[in-house]
Image (tube, grey):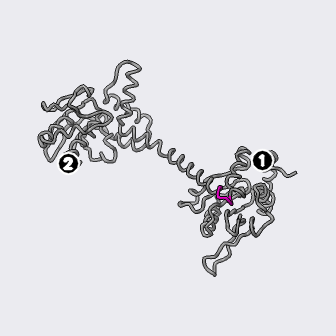
Amino acid sequence: MELSLLEWVKGVQKNKNLLSLDDEAKTKQSIILPILFKLGWNIFDALNEVCPEYRIKAKRTEDSVKKVDYSLRYQDQNRVFLEVKKVGIDLEIGDHQIQLLNYSFREGVELAILTNGISWWFYLPLRPGGWEQRRFYTIELFDQDPEEIVRKFSDFLSKDNVITGKAKENAEKLFTSNQKESLIKQNLPKAWNKIIEESNETLIDLIADTTAKLCGYKPDDEVVEKFIAQFANQKEYSNAINLTTDQSYKGKVPRSQSLQNTIYGSNVTNTQPSSYIFLGKSYRVKKWKEVLIKITINMLTLHPDQFSKVLTLSGRKPYFSKNPEELRNSEEINRTGIFIETNMSAVQKFKLSYAIIELFGYSESDLVINYQ
């Protein structure tokens, strides 16, 4: 009685006799052809289904003959290329992958497999990118669950799925899923670092609100921001954070905002401003609140008829309002009836200062803030 593929895989995993195969011919006869047969391919039809030593079309007449070990065919079309190495060969060594993908690309074959009988590497050759990027799945005959091995063999290599296009569809879905998972894994740390670097308002509010629930007292945004900066430094989340917190800085030499576009202003945490220069005129300041209010007054002086535009500036909460009750800590701007929120972190005040001048048509280069 013919064993099913699942029974065959379980038997192989138990005795591991296949590890003793010492050449390609034995690998093909003992592993490759039995698997293809159990997946529905007629291994005895060398013309129409399982074509051994398939000749690749030469680019030029003088080129040497190139062959791929097996071409799985249907209706005179190559559907899958399969390159076989003997058991024990490290598939990473040599140019096996590049060669197989080049052959597949030249012939327009959508699925390709490189195997030593034990490891099976599956590719989408027509996808853009390097050969490693085009590999979408690996089967390890001795290491994986037998049911999963059979399921994946069926998904990507069964005759029915190959000839109906279902195998290609399954491969594309897995490829996209792998790409999505890889991108998420790559960007989750970046997202966290970005939140930490920018002292994100949402994070500040969340920490402040949670602290209030725990102890009954809600910390100011600046207190929370300093905590976040300290936490980031302790954990050393990235070189970017180390740069933006300027850990090499030891003295009290004034710095400026010249790096703001690359570090989002996060280097102002735990600093105090000394002055700012707007349109060539210098203003002395001692606190970030003072920077924010004085720049707002500059805009009021220069643009009294348009000053109400500041009411359009907001984050998760308004920065300006005619109703002070909407703000946590407010201060009226020169009896205009417009109030500004002052319960903000240094980073938020830094950013808002630039947002205010840009609202009235000025550029970042018109404002330089010195701090230490």
Q: Are marks 1 and 2 in contact (CB under 8 Å)?
A: no
When asked about the image quadrant of residue 144, the answer is top right
Residue 274 highlighted magenta (yes or no)? no
- Identify the residue shown where x is 37% and y is 43%: 243
Q: Position of residue 156 (x, y in %)?
A: 67, 54
Q: Position of residue 3 (x, y in %)?
A: 83, 50
| Type of amino acid under label 2 | Tyr
Residue that badge 2 annotates:
362
| Type of amino acid under label 1 | Leu
Residue that badge 1 annotates:
6
- Residue nearest the observer in this picture, 72 or 211: 72
Tag 1's secondary structure?
A: helix
- Identify the residue shown where x is 69% and y is 62%: 82
- Does residue 207 appear to the left or right of 313 in the view shown? right
Marks 1 and 2 sit apart, C-alpha to C-alpha, by 71 Å
Figure label count: 2
For marks 1 and 2 on the same chain, the one whose residue lies earlier in the sequence: 1
- Residue nearest the observer in this picture, 45 or 203: 45
Question: What is the magenta segment's predominant secondary structure?
Answer: helix
Residue at the top extreme, as displayed: 216
Q: Position of residue 103 (x, y in %)?
A: 63, 68
Span of residues in magenta: 162-166
Residue 325 has which mark? none
- Identify the residue shown where x is 20% and y is 44%: 357
Q: Is residue 77 above or below residue 224?
A: below
